[in-house]
Amino acid sequence: MTLVPERQAWRPEAIVGDRVVLRRHRGENLKAFMRWYSDPEVARLTRYQIEPLTTDEIQRVFHSRIMGADFLAMAIYIRDTDRLIGTCAFSQLDGDNGSALYHITIGEHDAWGHGYGSEATALMIAHAFTQLTLHRVALTVFEFNARAIRAYEKCGFKVEGRARDAIFRDGRFWAEIHMSILAEEWEARQKPG
């Protein structure tokens, strides 16, 4: 039994929220990806490697993953201004087991800490459990990224484990935190009261 609907059904053109709109990526978004993923602070928060991605790596990731068929990748726009500020995606979509991995990057520094990432995450999770009929969405985040951890917890993710001393940053070792949310947990959060 496959839990996930046919691939065409799970790739929406847009998902609209109160403050952000998620849209399918277009080729011209590569320019923003180049800026975001060559940024040392974005690399610090998202990569095991210390150095940002190279130009060739960014292009390869963008064309094979973001624009490819194996990821459900959406561009994050501020709704009022239509400004592109980040990207979010599901990878490893497993219809047999009803699961996926979630990824998000808010690439524009001045958009950090304004709740855009939390809303984008909430929209993607709602899509996962209502349209994709998934059972579980998981993610990993570095322990030092407290802002991201708070945002994920706000959306209902729970810590389910940690890979101890998985990454060396800022002169010390940090854990990689494993988090997930289950469909029934998300559904319980939707009920009033």
Image (cartoon, helix red, strand yellow):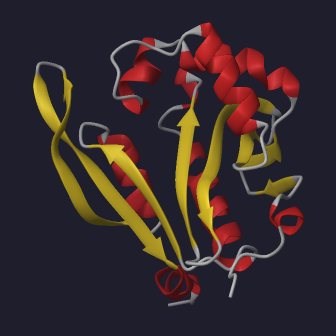
Q: Position of residue 131 (x, y in %)?
A: 76, 75
Answer above or below: position of 100 versus 146.
below
Answer above or below: position of 146 versus 27.
below
Answer above or below: position of 15 versus 166.
below
The N terminus - image quarter: bottom right
- Considering depth in this image, is 189 or 142 the residue closer to the camera? 142
Q: Position of residue 118 (x, y in %)?
A: 54, 52
- Considering depth in this image, is 145 or 83 the residue closer to the camera? 145
Determine the image quadrant of residue 34. Answer: top right
In this rendering, position of residue 11 left or right of residue 33: right
Please report the residue visible at 67 percent of the width from the left and 61 percent of the height from the top. Answer: 123
Identify the residue at the far top of this view: 55
Q: Position of residue 150 (x, y in %)?
A: 36, 52
Please report the residue visible at 34 percent of the width from the left and 28 percent of the height from the top. Answer: 48
Identify the residue at the far left of this view: 172
Q: Position of residue 62 (x, y in %)?
A: 70, 28
Determine the image quadrant of residue 7. Answer: bottom right
In this rendering, position of residue 93 left or right of residue 67: left
Determine the image quadrant of residue 66. Answer: top right
- The mark total stands at 0
Q: Is residue 157 visible?
A: no
Q: Is residue 6 visible?
A: yes
In this rendering, position of residue 70 left or right of residue 149: right
In this rendering, position of residue 103 left or right of residue 166: right
Answer above or below: position of 188 versus 44.
below
Please report the residue visible at 46 percent of the width from the left and 83 percent of the height from the top. Answer: 185
- Considering depth in this image, is 24 or 72 the residue closer to the camera? 72
